[in-house]
Amino acid sequence: MNKGISIALVFGIIFAMLGFTALTVGLTSYRVAETSIRTAREIEIISQLNNMEFLKQSLRQALVYSFYQSSYDVAKVGGLSPGQYNEVKIWRNYETTYQPNYIKDLNDTTFEIFKEYVTALKDSIEIPDYILTSVKKIDDTTVEVNASSTGKLKLKGRFYEINDNPNVTDKIKIKTIKLFEIGKENFVDKDSIKETVEDAITSIGFKSSCSLTACGSCPSAEQVFSSASCNGMSTNQAKNLIKERIDEKTNELSNELTSVDVRTNIEVLEKQADIKSSCSDTIGNCCRPCEDGCCANYCTKTCTFRYYGAAKTLTSIMDTTKYPVYDGSNDLRNIQLKFYAISSNDYVNAKLIP
Amino acid sequence: MKGLIDIIIFGVVFTLILGFGTIFPYVELNTVFRAQTTIEYKYSSVSQALIVLLSETQQDSQTATIKPVIEIIGEYLSSDSKPDMSFINNDLNLLFKNKCYRFSVSSQTFGSGLCKEENVTITKNIVLPYNKQKLLGEIKLVGE
């Protein structure tokens, strides 16, 4: 082998080694770069997962706000009768009662408000349409609200697609359902206004049956009523007394329905009282002592009196905790259930307030 | 002999070109991706810090009830009566472990001093208490 070929061989080997080194370094760098690309993609996915998490957090809070607003709007008019959305409802008109469908009302209103939030949040993430919400009482102070959809939350990028369950559930500390239950129990299921009027009349201790004897002509029922042996006051005074007692007893009812976390105020908007009498006369013609001597003719009038009272009330049952709601402006406000009730101690004979 | 020298020179040049040509692009790519990854990592960390902050619960100074921070901030942004938000500094100090941060809600800013230029800024719209005209409000978190 000549010298030239040997040198060429040595250099050839050196070149081959250099080439191999270059190839190795190149491949390593390629792998490093590939790993970097993968890491960058993974971190981008993590970032997008954060965005998804942020969206779910926003949807959850939107559902909470929706229920706050729904509670405020539904409670302040006592329920949502079709066509009467802005008027405070009459829950009782003597024997006729309004059956508040508060779970459905709260559910429907929460859903409508939540849809507005979903529209506002639709940005880079695809949010499906929600089909319903559900409202369920857990206990007196907790309500579970759920919004569900058949679609998925979607976030698409160049090399990824993230799907997530869009259903949102939260347990909210709020007493809206308890307020409605207190109202329904006391003014629909039973008639607390009727009981209050009865109690007011009974507490005065009016006499139900009285007699009065007079010489000559028969005394009037009014005279019988106001005589010292009967009630000792005129019927007008008696009616005013009934009205005063209705106020007093209504205040007592307000206090009975007030607790640490729920405050009740029953305002008497209108009150009426009436006294009806049924009398019979007994005429005598023998000598009978009267105030001014002895008379030949006298009359004994015996009357049975019936006492009636009626009241129209505006009841307000309030959660003492405040919530951020809108009513002309945003502020912290109490959820306050309001409704009217009209009743009397006798549905047949004492519809004194039309 | 002259031909052999030519071959050697050609071989060296070829190797250098091949070597640099192979290594350099990947080294550069590696550097670029490393920098990008660092930024993405920071972005992700600040995002997570924001999510954790908003999920925490604190006592609302106005109602004396425990609420998620997102709701207290929502009240701050939507209502004239502002809740006390001094707890934000304590929460963010814990989350950023004495690193720089700056959190802005409306005109109020909470911060831990000067931040470097390479900090990440996350701007998000959070949901506000219901108002048909304005359902979302902006918050901003800068962190490293």
Image (cartoon, rainbow, N blue to C red):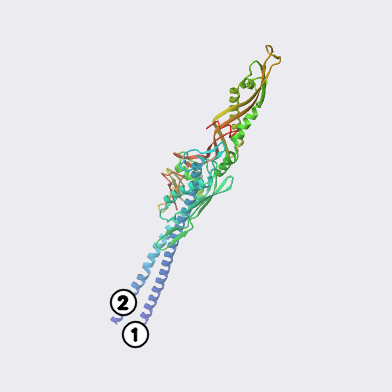
Residue B72 coordinates in the image, percent (x, y) = 49, 44
Q: Chain of mark 2?
A: B
Residue picked out by circle 1 = A5
Is residue A218 positioned above or below A108 on the image? above
Q: Is residue B27 visible?
A: yes
**B90 or A281, which lies in front?**
A281
- Say if A343 sits above or below B32 in the image: above
Task: Give the secondary structure at mark 2.
Answer: helix
Q: Which residue is tagged 2?
A: B10
Q: Amino acid at mark 1?
A: Ile
Name the side, left or right, on which A239 lies relative to A46: right
> Looking at the image, which is closer to me, B109 or A313?
A313
Closer to viewer: mark 1 or mark 2: 2
Numbered badge on residue A156: none
Is residue A273 found left or right of A66 in the rendered image? right
Q: Is residue B97 in sight in this rendering?
A: no
